[in-house]
Amino acid sequence: MSPYNDSGYDDDVNPFSSVPPANSRLAPLPPEPYDRGATIDIPLDSAQDLQAKEKELKAREADLKRREQELKRREEAIARAGVLMEENNWPPFLPIIHHDITNEIPIHLQKMLYIAFTTWLGLAACLVWNFVAVTVNWMKGGDPVIWFLALIYCITGVPGAYVLWYRPVYRAMRTDSALKFGWFFLFYTIHIGFCVFASVAPPIIFKGKSLTGILPAIDVLTDNAFVAIFYFIGFGFFAIESLISIWVIQQIYMYFRGTGKAAEMKREAAAKTMMAL
């Protein structure tokens, strides 16, 4: 042993030798038995199990195809009947109506329909402000009857306008239906008449100061200037709504005549009349 070797290991030991030295302190590990003919037991599905699974998959595939065909048949039947599947998506925070101009309306009609939609929102703003103004008048000693009338206008006017003329024009532009265009023109004319009447609000038909027209505003001005301010603002709202609505019906009617829908509507009306006879 070298005098400089302090590790305690013998320098004469060959670490690569297969025969351990006589003075080795470690006993060799016993050799592990190895059987060349041994088999590993791996569980495999039997042929019957595979056939059963294959039948089950085929049955599921056939069921899916049957359901797909049934769904396709129903969609085609709905399309032939003219029924459109609509999902409420507006307003985003509380979806109560279906409204998707960007994806459902042709590009050349989108601007026109957006303005028509603005008139529906404008009518809602007019009726809400009318209710606020009449409420202020009632609080200042006005007739409580006009407050109930203003509330009725607000509650019935907004959904009524949507059902009677905005939804028909939306569907008319989406499906290019002459009948729906005719329905829109009828009730949108009534809408314009109401807005013009409300901007003036003569003391006929609608009771007293339940509408914020120019005549009630002048009348209220002599009693209470503060209330009159609300009425003058309401008059401005109804006047602007009337002007925009007149422009909208002109533009839609020009498109309606230009595409030949007027003649088509007359033919449909004549055909229905002949069928009824």
Image (spheres, rainbow, N blue to C red):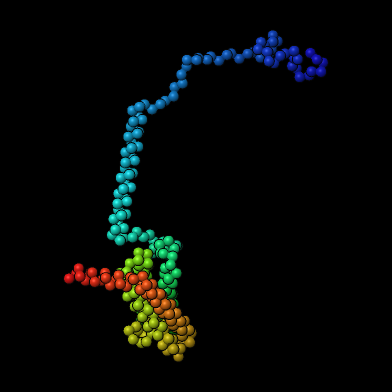
Q: Is there any visible trace of residue 90 in the rendered image?
A: no
Q: Residue at x 61, y 14 (%)?
A: 29
* Quadrant hosting residue 146: bottom left
Q: Quadrant of residue 147?
A: bottom left
- Residue at image position (33%, 32%) is 52
Q: Is residue 168 above or below residue 221?
A: above
Query: How many marks are shown on the rendered structure?
Result: 0
From this viewpoint, which residue is outermost toward the left?
Answer: 277
Q: Quadrant of residue 141?
A: bottom left
Percent of width and height locating residue 60: 33, 40
Name the residue nearer the viewer: 122 or 84: 84
Q: Position of residue 173 (x, y in %)?
A: 37, 67
Residue furthest to the right: 3
User: For the point 33% across and 44% down, which residue is it?
Assistant: 64
Query: Where's residue 221, x and y in %?
Result: 46, 88
Residue 11's place in the image compared with 156, above or below, is above
Foreground residue, 2 or 222?
A: 2
Q: Position of residue 96 (x, y in %)?
A: 39, 64
